[in-house]
Image (cartoon, rainbow, N blue to C red):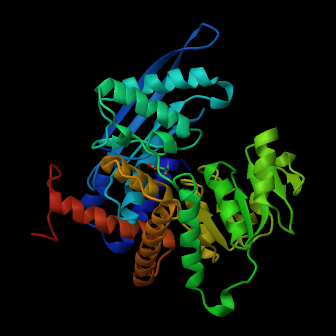
Amino acid sequence: MDFYKNTLGNMQKAAGIMHLDSEVLEALSHPQKTLMVSLPVRMDDGTLKVFEGFRVQHSELRGPFKGGIRYFPEVNLDEVKALATEMSFKCAVVGIPYGGGKGGIKCDTKKMSEGELERMTRKYVQATYQIVGPEHDIPAPDMYTNGQIMAWFMDEYSRLVNKYQPGVVTGKPIEVGGSLGRDTATAQGGVYVLEEYLNTLDEKDRKTDYKVVVQGFGNAGQHAADILHNLGYTIVGVSDSKGGLYNEKGMDPQAIMKTKKEKGSVIESSEGKAVKPHEILEVPCDILVLAAMENQVTEENMKNIKARIMLELANGPTSGDADEYLSKNGVVIIPDILANAGGVTVSYFEWLQNQQAYYWPLEEVKMKLKRIMQESFARVHHFQEEYKCTMRQAAYISAFDRLEKAMKLRGSGANLRCKIYR
Ligand code: GLU
């Protein structure tokens, strides 16, 4: 099923359960603004290549548009629309004052030089700078984008508007206005939520030794494996785009990170034995951390999943069919819009620090992140109990509740029937 339809499906299910005003659902089922741009870039060999770029601004009901930019060969408009929509819900779940947006460029970073990446990034800023800005739309890293790319973005934007504007993007390196703790925030936030969930279980349902598989070994996956390993969880499997690594006795994520850095993939590590990329989802474990990309657990492999808990650090890793099947079979899915919201939460902290030109110590970032993730989980848990639904549906309900109130209070443009505050 396609990712955008899946996202709209998730919204519709939650809206049905909570009897949401149909006009609110209708309004949020369409992005506010969509920009498609062509980026002509001079390549190292002297040729000119035109890249396709996107920025989708889904909703600014609760604050400026916010969301990452991904550089990936399969980027397309529907995918970016799905991701932008999810951002509006994600920011609402954790109650940070942002709407949702997302961007992307169709390109293969693995085949590009640093110079080509820099020139393409600057072209993207030149093509979008009129619609972004610290009070309008604030991009950040996503798949195959990083702090360096954000630094170029900030530099180009600051030049174009003729003033230093670190708050135009988040996920920057510390030296140019980044926040401590942003690099580990997605993983750390997910772990806080996971532990909150485990705390709700009765003693008899709790284990002392959880076996964990982490699919995807990029920023989120690497840090999740490391944080969980340090907390005493057993990491039995990891994977990247080249393949998986499995060892039922457990592995040291730091050693695997070192190998990946030196040799390019986790499969080169001697910590475990190599398995095919898709097989890593099907090995025995208690907790499956999905940190790769969308549409990984689908109709095709849902029956082979052994985990009882899935933590979605990627956006949209579980298809609608698989979500329904696994939930019916007792698998608890901690949904993306809650599980990975730690990333955008610390992006919010970074932006606050930029606005004030005053930087916080790591302890403060961690403490504030923990509090937001715990409160957000508690709110979702409350809706889950109230509506007797899945955690994903409860997370959407939690977000809709805030979005609906903002929409009705603002009333702008939408001409909504004002049921609540008539
Ligand atoms: N790309 C990340 C996400 O999907 C982070 C977004 C941000 O920090 O704005 O949540």
Q: Position of residue 174 (x, y in %)?
A: 50, 45
Q: Is residue 259 above or below residue 368?
A: above
Question: What residue appears at the point 44 percent right and 83 percent down from the top-left corner?
Answer: 385
Q: Position of residue 167 (x, y in %)?
A: 36, 43
- Residue 161 seen in the current view: yes
Q: Position of residue 170 (x, y in %)?
A: 44, 45
Between 290 and 375, the one lying in front of the other is 375
Q: Is residue 11 above or below residue 136?
A: below
Relative to 291, 263 lies left or right: right
Between 10 and 379, the one lying in front of the other is 379
Between 48 and 393, the one lying in front of the other is 48
Outermost residue toward the left in this view: 422
Question: What residue appears at the point 27 percent right and 44 percent down from the top-left corner?
Answer: 135
Question: What residue appears at the point 46 percent right and 39 percent down from the top-left corner?
Answer: 176
Q: Is residue 40 above or below residue 363?
A: above
- Residue 79 seen in the current view: no
Q: Is residue 44 above or below residue 291?
A: above
Relative to 337, 138 lies left or right: left
Q: Position of residue 19 (x, y in %)?
A: 31, 72
Quarter of the figure with residue 282: bottom right
Between 259 and 247, the one lying in front of the other is 259
